[in-house]
Image (cartoon, coloured by chain):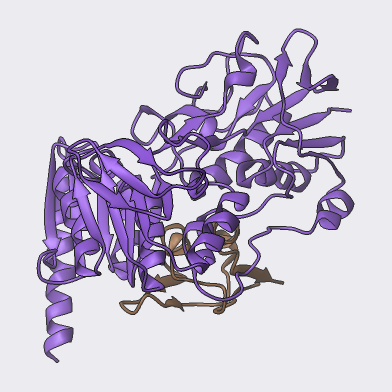
Amino acid sequence: MTRLVVVGASLAGLRAVEAARKAGHEGPITLVGDEAHVPYDRPPLSKAYLDEGEPESTTFREESHLTGELGVELVLGRGATGLDTEAREVLVGDDRVPYDALVVATGARARTLPQGGDLAGVHALRTLDDAVAVRRELDRGVKVVVVGAGFIGSEVASGARKRGLDVTVVEALETPLVRACGEAPGHWIAGLHEKHGTRLLCGNGVAALHGSGRVEAVELADGTVLPADLVVAGIGAIPNTEWLEGSGVELDNGVVCDATLASSAPGVYAAGDVASWINPVFDRRQRLEHWTSAAEQGATAARNALDPTNPTAYRTVPYFWSDWYDVRIQFVGTPQADEVVLVDGDPEAGERWVALYRAGDRLVGALTVNGQTEVMKYRGKILKGAAWDDALAFAEQRQQARSVTTAG
Amino acid sequence: MKICVDMNKCTGLGICESVAPDYFEVGDDGELRVLREEIALEDVSDLEESVTSCPTEALWIEP
């Protein structure tokens, strides 16, 4: 009977084991994860989890459900340390876990501040343990410095502001979120910080952290010194592939996969933040760190690993969301575009707007701020390869319908 | 078969709308509206996808 091993016990790993059972796989399944926790949901950790009061658990499934109903053998609190693709065994310390089909879902880990050293009060925010630690600091009512004005950093800043704390966000780039959203939209979104009383300093990196035992201040490249009791770094993530080095699985900014999530090694598939695959929608290699793709890739990778002669490609219009203050930011598609056009609203004046992204004569992306009713209509269009002119006409029509409704 | 939503879990992220626009729409207020509950036979796989792709696990199908 085919033995399925899934390495990485977060969303993609969980969805892999669930999809395997749903597809009728009756053989043994082993789920290996380096954290001690059963799989839990990460997006809330930098959002509602940081609010005042008792946080809601973000655990996906009870352990008894995983081991009982799903019949999964859990190996938690011990990460995989190596892979023998010849013998088809995952190395977990001194143990060897044999597989016929393997899904690699080891995700990514938060980049840490090189200046952080051993100082207390300096955190990343990626894991449940990180979130518990950051919450504890926020409860003490501290002065907060967030390093990195990306989505995680900005969510932490917003959570701290909600508690009325003094927050400064420091960003090394001149414009935040350029890679995720493009130049102008990055600037527009960043404006939300100032509007909500968070100080944003751009084009200024961290030179040093000061303090004895505990962090007391952050010194920036231009010499500015910011007093801080809590420093949270949201400076990106690194795919966890070190354990695969030398295994024969090709690595390049993640596990290199084809469109069906198959790696270069037989029987080895990848899913989630660690997977770099060819997305047929854009005919482009992508490595996404989004909830939706992690969940869907986990399921697809498991099904393909168990039925390798009949694989399906994973096609997606990437989607992510972020909640800042009382604002929901949503993006569908790819920000790699020739042009970005604001089709509704005004970022300077209000907190509701829609921007569309053009590559060639196609619509490839849409960014909305408080545009929940607009964003998914564009996701469908991007999937179908909608023409740019049609997208603009649709946007015009939506906007007119809106002004009629508002006037009435 | 019927599509059901737990409105206490739903936060209006809208992935369901992108998968099955005839069944779901997020309104201007950010709240999800179910446009039709009864699932047509040819739409079952789309609705199943909407269930598994919901980040808040707010959807399910009742037989």
* Viewer can see residue A305: yes
Q: Tell me where residue A360 appears, x and y as whole percent.
A: 15, 35
- Number of disc labels: 0
Residue pictured at 78% horizontal, 15% vertical: A88
* Viewer can see residue B55: no
Q: Tell me where residue A292 appears, x and y as whole percent.
A: 50, 49
Q: Which residue occupies the extreme front position in the image?
A: A212
Quadrant of image for the N terminus of chain A: top right
* Residue B18, quarter of picture: bottom left
* Residue A260, quarter of picture: top right
Q: Which lettered chain is shown in brown? A: B
Specify the colour of chain A: purple
Residue A114 relative to residue B60: left or right: left
Q: Which residue occupies the extreme bottom position in the image?
A: A408
Q: Tell me where residue A69 appears, x and y as whole percent.
A: 86, 54
Q: Nearer the viewer, residue A391 or B26?
A: B26
Residue pictured at 61% horizontal, 52% vertical: A128
Q: Is residue A302 above or below residue A63?
A: above
Quadrant of image for the C terminus of chain A: bottom left
Q: Nearer the viewer, residue A152 or A352?
A: A152
Q: Is residue A108 above or below residue B49?
A: above
Residue B31 relative to residue B37: left or right: left
Q: Tell me where residue A407 appears, x and y as whole percent.
A: 11, 88
Residue pictured at 56% horizontal, 76% vertical: A53
Q: Nearer the viewer, residue B16 or A352?
A: A352
Q: Nearer the viewer, residue A275 or A387?
A: A275
Q: Is residue A268 above or below residue A121?
A: above
Residue A350 relative to residue B58: left or right: left
